[in-house]
Image (tube, rainbow, N blue to C red):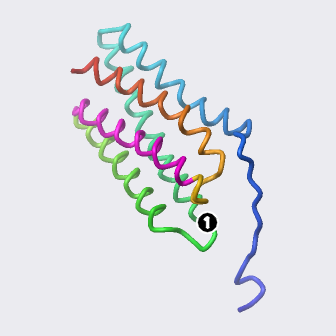
């Protein structure tokens, strides 16, 4: 093996949520709450458009989170684990099928899939953080961040039922 065939790195990560984790963790949750509130407030065509855009936002964020899981797996000690890859594929599948469902007008199905995906993140990311399969601060961030999306999506689901 040549010098460029292998790299060793040491990572020191905080248990506390870094400020960028706060900005990029909670910032993307705002469109969920704003979208849900406006969809409930505007029960007309504009409200329907806001609801649809909020669903699309949820799909984008869930697909992004699947990519985060894959990205972290590149830096996992010992290489990617089965759980990391399975979680990434599951989140991607839920996000993509939710996107297709929304595109086909199956709003309730799309919202339900998003709720399932975000609930998965809320449960599995803190576990992954404790086992070294995700950043340590995910154990503190996800339990307060992701429920914002879940509750907002539940409000949208209640609106459509």
**Residue at x-position 51% and y-position 53%:** 67
Residue 20 vs 149, above or below: the answer is below
**Residue at x-position 50% and y-position 68%:** 81
- Residue furthest bottom in the image: 1
Give residue 141's position: percent from left, percent from top: 60, 38
Quadrant of the image containing the N terminus: bottom right
User: Does the stretch in magenta take in 59?
Assistant: no
User: Does the stretch in magenta take in 116?
Assistant: yes
Circle 1 — which element? loop
Q: Is residue 51 left or right of residue 126?
A: left
Quadrant of the image containing the C terminus: top left
Residue identifier under label 1:
76
| Quarter of the rendering containing residue 142 | top right
Q: Specify start and end residues of the magenta stretch as a single range.
A: 105-128
Give residue 47's position: percent from left, percent from top: 35, 14
Residue 52 vs 76, above or below: the answer is above
Magenta: main secondary structure: helix
Residue 19 vs 156, above or below: the answer is below
């Amino acid at each position: 093996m040549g010098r460029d065939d292998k790299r060793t790195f040491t990572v020191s990560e905080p248990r506390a949520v870094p400020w960028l984790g706060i900005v990029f963790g909670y910032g993307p949750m705002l469109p969920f709450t704003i979208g849900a509130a406006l969809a409930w407030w505007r029960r007309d065509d504009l409200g329907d458009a806001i609801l649809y855009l909020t669903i699309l936002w949820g799909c984008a964020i869930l697909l992004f989170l699947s990519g985060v899981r894959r990205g972290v797996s590149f830096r996992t000690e010992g290489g990617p684990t089965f759980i990391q890859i399975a979680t990434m594929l599951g989140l991607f599948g839920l996000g993509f099928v939710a996107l297709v469902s929304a595109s086909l007008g199956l709003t309730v199905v799309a919202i339900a899939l998003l709720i399932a995906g975000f609930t998965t993140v809320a449960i599995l990311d803190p576990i992954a953080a404790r086992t070294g399969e995700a950043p340590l601060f995910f154990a503190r961030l996800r339990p307060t961040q992701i429920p914002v999306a879940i509750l907002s999506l539940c409000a949208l689901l209640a609106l459509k039922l």
